[in-house]
Amino acid sequence: MRILLLIITGLALIAPATALAQTPPFTLFPVIGGAHYTDDFGDGRAGGSHEGNDLLAPCGTPTVAVVPGTVTLDWGDRSGWMVTLKGKSSWYRYIHMDGRDGPRSALAKGLKDGSRVKAGQIISYVGDTGDASGGPCHLHFELHRGANVSSPYAYLQTATIMQLDPADPVSANAVTPQVSLTITGVVAWTATVAGEGRLIIRPTGVSSSDGTKLSHAGTIALRASPSLFPAASVGRSVTVTTTAVGLTTALQDIVPLSWTAATVT
Ligand SMILES: [Zn+2]
């Protein structure tokens, strides 16, 4: 008993020191205004496991350096425009950046390869380049420590979210209206495919939050967190709302899996 007590006392003494030593690798959220995301690090994807978190936000939303460092811009067929931020002890990848104006919309104005940036400085814009094309605009964000890729999820959850400064024309121009859908109908099917939830609705009504006309035929296939499945048993009449995103043609046409369910009631 005495030995056990000693061990417990020892642990209590060590614990605060360990917490202090573990400085988070970043404390700023990479997307201005925040984003919709799930804990999708390690999910199965075509070509391997998912090495980051997908942060859904309208195309053109500014992204900021999460730490001070240097930036470089690269292109890859799968990544599309990719900005690498090299900090002191970690480095970060910002993938699928805005390509509407080629490299000029993928790296913020005034920056070039090797530019030094401050934490919180706008470095790029959310896009849908590479294999994100046709899906919702999002930032695929990766955290690397040396040769290891780590999940950024826990740090994203406690990170400070910066807001747009309307006085700053660089960021103000980037705001696109956010639109969500309300779908009423009957659940036709739910499934988890490669760690990703799918919700198929036989719709009786579909409306958009800003009145945009939508075209769709037959069933609607949504991305959905499996945590929504208890409310979505097959055959049940439900009302589904989606996450709000900047409209693209694919979203307007309700291309399968282009929208993500946020709530099911
Ligand atoms: Zn991703």
Image (spheres, rainbow, N blue to C red):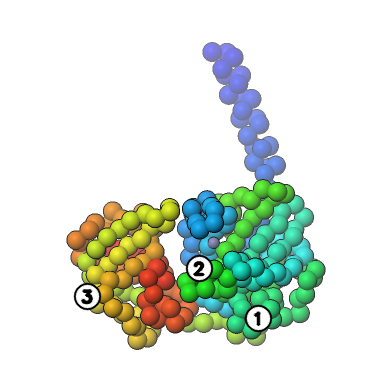
* Mark 3, secondary structure of its residue: strand
Q: Quadrant of residue 191?
A: bottom left
Whole-percent x, y for residue 185 in the image? 23, 70
Report crowding for label 1: few under 14, some 14 to 19, many 20 or more residues within 10 A (C-alpha). Answer: few
Q: Is residue 198 visible?
A: yes
The residue to which callout 2 is attached is: 56
Task: Between residue 108 and residue 20, name the one nearer to us.
Answer: 108
Which label's residue is closer to the chain start, 3 or 2? Answer: 2
Q: Amino acid at mark 1?
A: Gly
1 or 3: mark nearer the eye: 1
Pointer 2 local density, CA inside 10 Å: few below 14, some 14–19, many at least 20: many
Name which quarter of the figure residue 202 lies in: bottom left
Question: How far from the left and from the top, in percent, is residue 24?
Answer: 65, 50
Q: CA distance from mark 1 to mark 3?
A: 41 Å
> Can residue 162 be seen in this snapshot?
no
Q: Position of residue 233 (x, y in %)?
A: 24, 56
Q: Nearer the viewer, residue 28 or 203?
A: 203
Secondary structure beneath dot 2 equals strand
Pair 1/2: label in front: 1
Disc 1 CB within 8 Å of nearest ligand 1 atom: no
The label on residue 102 is 1
Q: Distance from label 3 to label 2 (Cα)?
A: 27 Å
Q: Amino acid at mark 3?
A: Thr
Residue 140 is situated, as x and y percent measured from the top left of the image, at 57, 64
**Element on which disc 1 rests:** strand
| Mark closer to the chain start, 1 or 3 | 1
Which three-letter amino acid code belongs to the residue tagged 2?
Answer: Leu
Q: Which mark is residue 204?
A: 3
Residue 182 sits above or below residue 4 on the image: below
